[in-house]
């Protein structure tokens, strides 16, 4: 890869499906999906730049991450891929579609939004960058967990998410928060999305509310919308059975 090494899993056979993880996690967040989805599809599950086994961390934009993944898919001989993104993964998936629409077979946009950060959200990103620069990545678990997971999330899920967050380095987190802060507004181009699209929201998501997910689905012609009950911002982890059922029905 031009940007460095890219760690990934390549599982199963069939039409290719690219799973794009959330911030500040890594490919391991998709473990509850691997068995169910790889029974019918070829799963490509990378760590994005600077996370997990993909090194080194470096500055990036959403467009550059789309370039990374297009290069990766070309090397993996996976044209016409379905993209499944949760949270930040959804931002990246939308950027990928905007630049490489002919390379996208289907889109699953879960717990994500199309609009750019507003000024209040950008200020919060800047505050997090300053805190990371001053105190390092140790601040991340306590800041992120209450927003990512519902209050009564199963202890095993909390431990798993905390473990992934604790693996994230301060440089990777800083570069990514910058990319999230500076991402472009995709909401005005949603009407141009021409591939089959599924929009998912978590019933108890504190970051992307139900009405915002519904509005995004309404803006994409012919899209499907589903709510994952009993889940917060990481619907694939908090209710994997329902997430897998809905996603499999859509991908088939």
Image (cartoon, rainbow, N blue to C red):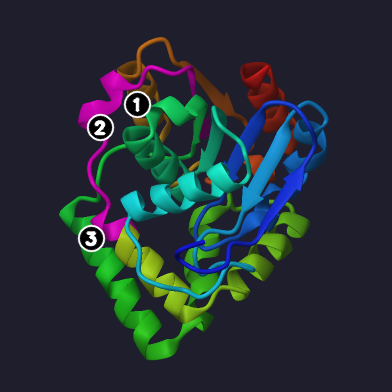
Whether tag 1 and tag 2 are in contact, CB under 8 A, the answer is yes
Can you identify the residue that label 2 sits on?
A: 187
Outermost residue on the left side: it is 119
Q: Earlier in the sequence, mark 2 or mark 3?
A: 3
Q: Earlier in the sequence, mark 1 or mark 3?
A: 3
**Image quadrant in which you'd find residue 176:** bottom left
Q: Whole-Å distance between the Cαs marked 1 and 3?
A: 21 Å
Q: Horizontally, is 238 left or right of 112 in the view?
A: right
Q: Nearer the viewer, residue 66 or 140?
A: 66
Q: Horizontally, is 142 left or right of 167 in the view?
A: left
Q: At x 62% / y 74%, what residue is drawn? A: 167
The quarter of the picture where the C terminus appears is: top right
Q: Earlier in the sequence, mark 1 or mark 2?
A: 2
Q: Is residue 114 above or below residue 159?
A: above
Q: Nearer the viewer, residue 95 or 231?
A: 95
| Residue 25 in the image, given as x and y percentages of width and height | 58, 61
Can you identify the residue that label 3 sits on?
A: 122
Task: Answer whether residue 166 is magenta in the image.
Answer: no
Can you identify the residue that label 1 sits on?
A: 216
Whether tag 2 and tag 3 are in contact, CB under 8 A, the answer is no
Q: Horizontally, is 49 left or right of 228 in the view?
A: left
Q: Is residue 190 above or below residue 77?
A: above
Q: At x 39% / y 44%, what residue is drawn? A: 91
| Residue 151 in the image, given as x and y percentages of width and height | 59, 53
Q: Is residue 71 above or below residue 33?
A: below
Q: At x 26% / y 40%, what residue is drawn? A: 115
| Residue 15 in the image, given as x and y percentages of width and height | 68, 26
Q: Whole-Å distance between the Cαs marked 1 and 2?
A: 8 Å
Q: Nearer the viewer, residue 246 or 145?
A: 246
Which stretch appears magenta?
Answer: 180-203
């Amino acid at each position: 890869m031009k940007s460095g090494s890219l760690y990934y899993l390549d599982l199963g056979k069939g039409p290719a499906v690219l799973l794009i993880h959330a911030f500040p996690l890594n490919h391991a967040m998709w473990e509850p999906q691997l068995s169910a989805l790889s029974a019918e599809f070829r799963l490509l599950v990378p760590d994005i730049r600077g996370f997990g086994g993909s090194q080194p961390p470096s500055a990036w934009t959403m467009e550059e991450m789309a370039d990374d993944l297009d290069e990766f898919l070309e090397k993996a001989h996976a044209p016409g891929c379905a993209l499944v993104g949760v949270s930040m993964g959804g931002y990246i998936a939308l950027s990928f579609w905007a630049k490489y629409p002919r390379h996208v077979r289907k889109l699953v946009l879960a717990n994500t939004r199309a609009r750019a950060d507003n000024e209040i959200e950008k200020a919060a990103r800047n505050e997090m960058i300053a805190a990371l620069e001053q105190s390092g990545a140790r601040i991340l678990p306590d800041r992120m967990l209450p927003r990512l997971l519902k209050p009564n999330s199963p202890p095993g899920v909390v431990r798993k998410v905390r473990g992934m967050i604790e693996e994230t380095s301060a440089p990777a987190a800083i570069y990514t928060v910058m990319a999230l802060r500076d991402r472009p507004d995709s909401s005005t181009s949603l009407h141009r999305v021409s591939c089959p699209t599924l929009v998912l929201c978590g019933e108890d998501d504190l970051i992307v509310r139900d009405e915002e997910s519904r509005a995004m689905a309404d803006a994409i012609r012919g899209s499907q919308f589903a709510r994952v009950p009993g889940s917060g911002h990481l619907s694939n982890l908090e209710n994997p059975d329902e997430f897998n059922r809905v996603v499999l029905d859509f991908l088939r």
